[in-house]
Image (cartoon, grey):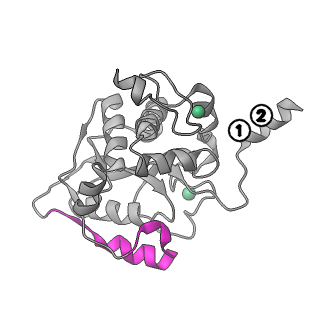
């Protein structure tokens, strides 16, 4: 009955999909950023490892923040269609599992926190949904009791790189936490400059974390970037 009034929809193209599907098959394929197309250390399409010192050690991402990924992320944040959070979590868990020699084993999954007032308003933190999906696939514990976020004046996406860097200092870690020797997977929805994730990784390491790998549903590509998935499609149709 519920499905009749509120059918499950693909968060990319809005087509009605089966209740147990997350994206329609076509969008699910188009949205993936090829595993070889991003740096496995910084998580960017154009590597920033040389120019930035980042506190995290490795990165896995699901998609590039362009084309069909944008509506999927907007739905995840604004319309309560959180299918993409689960989809990206599952994709990243599989990527880790398929490259275990590189990524290794983790002790727990931690989402980048959201300010409590904002989370109450939205009803959920999308980074937590991603963390839960990864944790479930990899049979790991996920924890929301480690990091916290204080209020900031501006939404992260409106900020310059310098403001993002300063904004990143609104994150904190609970005093009594010990992460001695742990290998941690840190999750977020969008990886932009890496400031937020690097700051959170720094906090985790301040409590003894051995390594931090970031898992981001989406990574912002350079302005001139073209999705190779689209190019092959267009060439094939010629
Ligand atoms: Zn679709
Ligand atoms: Zn890099």
* Residue wearing tag 1: 229
Quadrant of the displayed image that contains ligand 1: top right
What residue is shown at x 27% (from left), y 57% (from top)? Answer: 121
Q: Residue at x 44, y 28 (%)?
A: 7
Mark 2 sits near ligand 1, with its Cβ under 8 Å away: no
Q: Is residue 128 above or below residue 166?
A: above
60 or 151, nearer to the observer: 151
**Pointer 2: what residue?**
233
Total numbered badges shown on the rendered structure: 2
Left or right: residue 11 versus residue 57 is right
Q: Position of residue 89 (x, y in %)?
A: 41, 38
Residue 163: image location, x then y, percent: 44, 78
Q: Position of residue 85 (x, y in %)?
A: 42, 41
Q: Is residue 163 magenta?
A: yes
Q: Is residue 62 within the magenta segment?
A: no
Residue closest to the eye, 9 or 156: 9
In the foreground, 204 or 181: 204
Task: State the separation of the CA atoms marked 2 and 1.
Answer: 6 Å
Q: Are marks 2 and 1 in contact (CB under 8 Å)?
A: yes
Q: Position of residue 204 (x, y in %)?
A: 27, 59
User: Counting other residues with Cα less than 10 Å from the Cα at mark 1, is it few (<14), some (14-19), or many (20 or more)?
Assistant: some
Q: Which mark is residue 124?
A: none
As displayed, is residue 212 above or below residue 170? above
Q: Quadrant of the N terminus?
A: top left
Q: Residues within 10 Å of mark 2 (few under 14, many from 20)?
A: few
SS assignment for the magenta stretch, majority = helix
Q: Which residues are magenta?
A: 154-174
Left or right placement of residue 13 versus residue 21 in this view = right
């Amino acid at each position: 009955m519920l499905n009749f009034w509120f059918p499950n929809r693909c968060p990319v193209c809005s087509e009605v999909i089966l209740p147990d599907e997350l994206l329609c098959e076509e969008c699910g394929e188009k949205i993936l950023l090829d595993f070889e197309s991003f740096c496995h250390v910084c998580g960017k399409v154009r590597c920033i490892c040389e120019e930035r010192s980042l506190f995290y050690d490795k990165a896995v991402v699901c998609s590039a923040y362009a084309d069909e990924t944008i509506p999927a992320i907007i739905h995840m944040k604004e319309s309560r269609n959180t299918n993409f959070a689960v989809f990206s979590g599952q994709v990243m868990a599989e990527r880790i599992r398929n490259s275990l020699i590189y990524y290794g084993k983790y002790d727990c999954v931690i989402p980048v926190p959201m300010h409590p007032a904002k989370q109450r308003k939205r009803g959920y933190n999308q980074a937590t949904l991603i963390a839960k999906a990864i944790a479930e696939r990899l049979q790991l514990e996920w924890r929301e009791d480690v990091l916290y976020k204080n209020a900031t004046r501006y939404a992260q996406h409106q900020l310059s790189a310098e403001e993002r860097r300063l904004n990143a200092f609104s994150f904190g870690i609970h005093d009594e936490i010990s992460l001695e020797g742990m290998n941690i997977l840190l999750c977020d929805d969008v990886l932009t400059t890496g400031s937020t994730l690097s700051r959170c990784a720094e906090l985790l390491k301040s409590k003894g974390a051995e390594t931090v790998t970031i898992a981001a549903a989406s990574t912002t590509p350079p302005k001139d970037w073209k999705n190779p998935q689209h190019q092959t499609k267009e060439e094939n149709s010629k």
